[in-house]
Image (cartoon, rainbow, N blue to C red):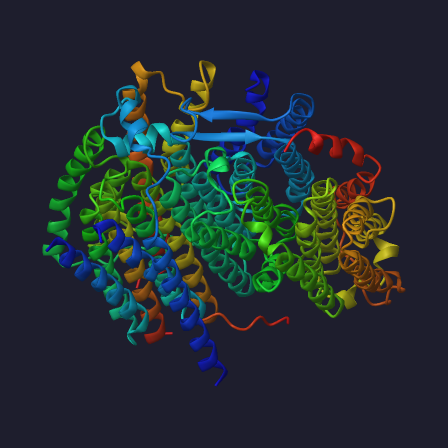
Amino acid sequence: MTEPLIDPLVWLILLPLAWATLAFVLGPGRGAWLAISGLLAQCWLAFDLAQKVGTGGTALYAVGGWGAPLGIDLAVDGLSAAMLLLTQTVALPLAIYARSYFKPDDPAGAWFWPLIGFLIAGLNALFVSADLFNLYVTLELVGLAAVGLVAAGGGAQQVVAALRYLFATLVGSGAYLLGVSLIYGVYGTVSISTLLPLVTDDAPRLVWIAGALMVAGLLLKTALFPFHFWLPPAHGGAPAPVSALLSALVVKASFYLILRLWLGPLQPLLPTFAWLMATLGAAAIFWGSWQAIRAVKLKRLIAYSTVAQLGYLFLIFPLLAAPGALQAVVMQVFAHGLAKAGMFAAAGVLIKATGQDMVAGLAGAVERLPVTMFAFALSGMTLMGLPPSSGFLAKWQIIEAALAQGHWIIAVVVLAGGLLAAVYVFRILRQAFLLTPASTTLAPVPRTLEWSAFALAAASVLLGLRGVELMQLLGAGI
Amino acid sequence: MKRIVVVALVVTLALAFVFLLSGAMLELEPAAIDLRAPVSAHLADSGVSHPVTAVLLNYRGYDTLLEIAVLLLALLAILAVVGDTAATRPVAAHPVLQTLGRLATPLMVVVAVYLLWTGAFRPGGAFQAGAVLAAAAVLLHLVGLLPGWSTPRLRLRIGLAAGFALFLAVAAALLKQGSLLQYPPEAAGALILLIEAGLTVSLALILAGLFLFLAREEGA
Amino acid sequence: MTTGFVFALAGAALFALGVAGVVLIGHLLRRILAFNLMGSGACLVLVGLAQRHDVADPVPQAMVLTGIVVAVAATALALALVRKLHALTGQLELPDDADD
Amino acid sequence: MTLAFDLLLALSLLWCGWRTLATPRLDRAIVLFITFGLLMTLAWARLSAPDIGLAEAAIGTGLTGALLLDAYGVLRRRRVEP
């Protein structure tokens, strides 16, 4: 255990909990500045932690001083440091965006600040927890916060979406909990580090069932095809800053946990299902893209694009033995996280300006809102995987890993997915380049909204030029 | 027709799952790790003598911290969903019921205090105590003595958040001399009792709030 | 056959019953009941299986206490959403996803 | 003897759970669910887990039951006088 790693790790959990509670006490609609300054500090903490992990390797932290298996351990390595970094850097611009997005008397914004505080605390806690039951509690924290954000102050459609999301997320965490129960029954512990040497490939049948239950529950939460039914209404129907947070971060949290189990305690068992995962991932790419291509509503389209982009994450499971595969998947998580946050933020600007959520209503947007449309195009570039964006880097690495192991079919799927993404991105851009119909008037939109969307989108492209640092962080030990 | 196929499929899957799971459970060997030994070995240092409370508030106190966050968050999400509505007057119940409510409340408060205090060495503790207090509030509401709650004012918000804030503050303060939530053995008992007392009040308010914030929207 | 085993098996069956209920039942209040059955089932498995030799184990017991509180939090949120939906539309079932 | 009691209790739990979902009337389903909670309390007692029994009775059954009954009452009132 290296001493100086400790503080940023713990404060990344305590700080958002503290400002969330304080924002709640301050009352409805208050706490924006509190949240933004909190997130600013968290960004610094996450960078600090990443730097320390990059040089010092992994660290273990025993909460309460007991140590596993009696107590709960927190653990941080390159993968979790990277996820923490992504979470804080996406959340900060979105918080600035949200402050301008919600008008003071907007019921959807009344409890937004404490809710995202708990959401981010849950995410951070999830990324560093090394205890299967503690992970269950963090999953519930994230899930309930996300449902609350989707439903907040909304109309019937939002409530329907929230209910569908709530049942999906509850069944998902229920299955995960049953899996954890079985693991405890078999081994008498839920600590990941204690389990590592105990689980072998001749484990009792119950452990296989437990693994299947946990992964199935998490797949439902990650909305992998065919479990994606709840995602488009929830991500498409929520207010724009919420959609951005959900698509960029929340679905990645359960994916991260699958990856963590796969590389960790369940390693001897799960590779049996690698090709099943990859097949579902490919199906997600095709189905999600197809639905995005024929979507009528703008945010629906972007939500279906999330379904498709999540598919790429699952393509790498058969490749995980190759050295570059983990880097590829984390790059895809970053690329999609930044680009999708930027795209939903840009969509929020367009909806505010045009007063409607229709793809057909975008005519003339390029003329009137050039910054926003540029942000949209940059995000689209990353989603398609055009160089020099981080999306290109991610897809390149997946293809490289696939070809190195002779799985050319995966490379074909990646290329086809890029082409399909181009179709739905250009559908929007083409509409936006049309001349403005004389009758339409656009409502004025705060500059902050446009520029925070732009910052996220630009980051998704620029990360492609600075990918090496991220790769080094991941190399620092998993 | 399609419905019948779906039902049949789900039922078959459920039965197969139970069959598989039961079979696998029955062939189980004893677990490799037995946590009962370390739980009782460190009980003297945990500040309480009831093992479940020791696990809940000391060994795995971090779980409990996050769990209180979940509870506070659920209340928050409910406030966000229900939106802003005016509080309504409750319907007064039969006088006999009201008298019963008046009599039961102090009794329930006594039970709650007993449960809180006894949790250190016997079954009981903050959760059960808070739940009993919340039940008293629900009872008072049902007999018409306590109105449903509207958007919480500052005092109520402080009450709702205080238990969690106190827990969080203790956790952070303990960082100065050890790791997160690492109680020094000699102070563990007092700190746990402090946290539990705070939690009892806030848990009672939150659990009652889950009911009373919902109850407010229609007065009948 | 010990007490722990009996209730672990019952828990497994309850979990399956609950999941089947959430999947098959349209009425939202009943779905919430089904979700609670599912949660109770998982809790029974956690304690029952750990205590299959009938010796009490405080660790899973404390975990179940956490699980019960989380379940009631989720139930309350679900009920709030159902009541809001009913107030807005008069419906107690989820409509088909309109945009697909 | 105790095994017989446990088996009986487990079967009642399952039956109660099943009826909760299958019974046609909603009010009866909720009452069955509360009964289910009380049986769960008994089960926790049998598993020598009195802490959970207390919490289940107070929170899992008491509060959840009150929430469900309250929701049922509101939904029915709305239906009667729209």
Q: Residue at x 24, y 61 (%)?
A: D13
Image side of residue B142 versus residue C87, left or right: left
Q: Is residue B98 left or right of residue A361?
A: left
Q: Residue furthest front?
A: A202
- Which of the two residues, A46 or A430, is positioned nearer the viewer here? A46
Q: Residue at x 68, y 64 (%)?
A: A283
Judge from the rendering whether residue A38 lies leftward or rightward of residue C8; answer left or right.
right
Q: What number of labels is visible?
A: 0
**Residue D6, x across and y down, in percent:** 18, 56
Viewer-closest of A364 and C98: C98
The image quadrant where one finds the N terminus of chain A is top right
Locate residue D38, reporting x and y percent: 20, 56
Quadrant containing the C terminus of chain A in the rendered view? top right
Q: Position of residue A239 (x, y in %)?
A: 62, 54
Tell me: residue C71, above or below residue C32.
Answer: above
Residue B207, quarter of picture: top left
On the image, the x and y values in percent for residue A110 come to 53, 46
